[in-house]
Image (cartoon, grey):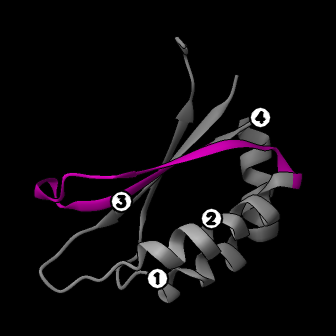
Amino acid sequence: MSVIVTVIYPKTETSTFDLDYYMKTHMPLVQEKWGPHGLKNWTVTKLDESAGYSMQALIWFESKEAWAKAGEAEGPTIMGDVPNFSSEKPLLVFGEEVKRVV
């Protein structure tokens, strides 16, 4: 079963988030670095900021093992890019997909 990694960025009174950089530079970097490690696809959602978060990325991996290997191999590079577009550290949670209806 696929693993879905949810990445959400906090929204505060002083936080900043550069969506243009995120879409044109960061997410292509994610694709480039994690693609060879089992990244299947990803989506980006602009959240209702009243919930305390501004952006969300959902990232699908082939398996929990693929996610672990991707994080080990390229996690520092991916996370090292965060200050280039966000003043806040993201929250990452992951879990196994149970069912998908399309």
Mark 1 / mark 3, whichever is N-terminal: 3
Residue visible at 69% across and 78% down in the picture? 76
Q: Amino acid at mark 4?
A: Glu
Residue at which label 4 appears: 62
> Where is residue 91 drawn, in percent x and y?
40, 61
Q: Quadrant of the N terminus?
A: top right
Is disc 1 placed on a helix, strand or loop? loop
* Mark closest to the chain's N terminus, 2 or 4: 2
Q: Is residue 30 left or right of residue 21?
A: right
The C terminus - image quarter: top right
Label 4, label 1: how many angstroms apart (C-alpha)? 27 Å
| Cβ atoms at labels 1 and 3 below 8 Å apart | no
The furthest residue to the right? 36
- Amino acid tagged 1: Phe
Q: Secondary structure at mark 2?
A: helix
User: Residue 32 appears in which quarter of the rendering?
Assistant: bottom right
Q: How far is mark 2 from mark 4, CA to CA?
A: 18 Å
Give amino acid for label 3: Met
Q: Nearer the viewer, mark 4 or mark 3?
A: 3
Q: Residues within 10 Å of mark 2 (few under 14, many from 20)?
A: some
Is residue 46 highlighted in magenta? Answer: yes
Of pointers 3 and 2, the one earlier in the residue sequence? 2
Q: Earlier in the sequence, mark 4 or mark 1?
A: 4
Q: Which mark is residue 55?
A: 3
How far is mark 4 from mark 3, CA to CA? 23 Å
Q: Please tell me how crowded label 1 is: few (under 14), some (14-19), or many (20+) other residues with Cα within 10 Å.
A: some
**Residue extent of the magenta highlight:** 36-59
Q: Would you call the spot at circle 3 few (<14 residues within 10 Å), some (14-19), or many (20 or more)?
A: some
Residue bearing mark 2:
27
Q: Is most of the magenta stretch helix, strand or loop?
A: strand
Left or right: 77 in relation to 48: right
